[in-house]
Amino acid sequence: MAGAAHLSLVLFAALSIATSQLSAQSGGCAQCHAEIAANYARTGMGRSFSRLTAQTNRADFLRENTFLHEASDRYYEAVERGGLFYLRRWQQDAEGRRFNLVEKRIDYALGSGNHAVGFLHRTPDGRLLQLPLSWYSANGGYWAMAPGYDRPDHADFRRDVDLECLFCHNAYPDEDRQEIPDAAVRFSGELPEGVDCARCHGVASGHAEAARRGDAAAVRSTVLNPARLSRERSLEVCMQCHLETTTNLLPHALRRSGRGYFSYDPAEPLADYVLHFDHAAGQEDKFEVVSAVYRLRQSKCFARSPMTCTTCHDPHHIERGAAGRERHNAVCKSCHETKLADEGVHVRQADCVACHMPQRVADDALHVRMTDHRILARPLVAAEPAAADETGGAAYQGPVALYYPDKRPRSPNFVLDLALAQVKDFANLSAGLPALAQAIERFAPRDPRYSYFLGEGLRRQGRATEAARAYRAALSVEQSYWPAGLGLGLALAAAGDLDDAATALAQAFVASGVAVAVAVALADVHYRLGRLEE
């Protein structure tokens, strides 16, 4: 949920998603697999998203629950009142008098609490807003700013939770899987609570029905067991959420054309759903919160053995503390014990993981220590990130390289997607814009995103007339694709064509329903035209 860097990341859509309390896709797995389900419910994935109640709360709302964020000159207080939870914000004048006071109810907890818990507010119209304070579990627990908020100009109570966040923090909601890219979402009904069985095993309704019929062959064939997959495909089941090359804008990943956020089936190759991208070669030494697979794939242990994530981790039962160390050390010794005995120089009874996979402060979350999954024979002593200020440096400028899959897909859409990756977050416009324009002309995709992002890149370079043509091309593919209508209006306004800009923005406003960005742009054009009443 990185901060917005261009127009597409501030768009708002009134997309209504109907959800159910329980994930129907899991098919009532606990009825037959009660022990596994009970153990899984205690794992981080099982506790990744929940309604905040006295029973699910893992933070301390009573002691040391006030936090001053000096960079933004705001006070925050986590409050429990009448069985409900709230986050209060205010500022103070020189005499200590409070002003700019706002309070939001906390409706959901985001995260298991193993490292941290974030908090969400659900608005009356169904949007989810991330709240700026999080609870961190280290050192007995403490309150501090949420990741991305340690900066003077943070989003405060205005950051919409997008579908990319929910994809990995929760089960699929029960909806039609048709989302507008990069748009905020409205939910109706109850949300699922926690990553469910279907995320790794696929939709289980047919499996459950076969079990009721006593059809043993169908029981096996109607559910996915990742343990029976090839090494590559087994890893991909984990990689759907545990692979992120960077949180910085590249983009790090692009969903394939026509794929909604919640359309991935673990039975299919991951590259059919999403392509992963990275910085150009030479910038691989990144350690971030979701870098487990990225770092693991850099390890000689990974390259020279058939290991997967489940070599060390049982996803149904995550052992921690002494039991976890014993399990992980046993895995290491299963390969290395003979060599260590022959060399006779290694410390006996050592904690393999503590030395060779140390916990470090993540570059993109300054209040948590994560296990570095890059296994090194002689671990390097890495410098910890400095001050808790997430303003960051200049945005990356340079080629965006395909990271995964390892082999380039053979399809016209890949040519389009590789060009789009150069343009989407403006990393490589000089090479990406002509490549994307040529690919659009050659393949004529029936997906408005390609021409839309071409327009975004052109407008970024101040080429308003060319950008307007690209936006019109996107609208010719899908007239209701209102982000292109917004871009068209802004490009026309930049070119001085205010009347046509007003027309384009008015159409985009109707198509979007309640897009704030469109309303602001339309109001600005009316003001410039002297139409103050509009």
Image (cartoon, rainbow, N blue to C red):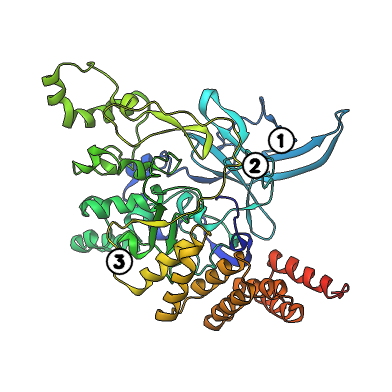
Q: What amino acid is labelled 2 in the image? A: Pro
Q: Is residue 392 left or right of residue 43?
A: right
**Count the marks: how many?**
3
At 21% across and 63% down in the image, what residue appears? 215
At 38% across and 44% down in the image, what residue appears? 284
Residue 226 shows up from this direction: yes
Q: Is residue 233 left or right of residue 94?
A: left
Q: Are marks 3 and 2 in contact (CB under 8 Å)?
A: no
Say the numbered circle drawn on residue 76: 1
Image quarter in which the C terminus is found: bottom right
User: How busy is the neighbourhood of tag 2: few (under 14 within 10 Å), some, or many (20 plus)?
Assistant: many
Image position, residue 78 (x, y; %)? 68, 35
Callout 2: helix, strand or loop?
loop
User: How busy is the neighbourhood of tag 3: few (under 14 within 10 Å), some, or many (20 plus)?
Assistant: some
Q: Nearer the viewer, residue 178 or 23?
A: 178
Dot 3 or dot 1: first in sequence order is 1
Residue 64 picture quarter: top right
Callout 1: helix, strand or loop?
strand
The residue identified by callout 2 is 132
Residue 471 picture quarter: bottom right
Q: Nearer the viewer, residue 4 or 238?
A: 4
355 shown above or below 148: above
The residue identified by callout 3 is 409
Q: CA distance from mark 3 to mark 1?
A: 49 Å
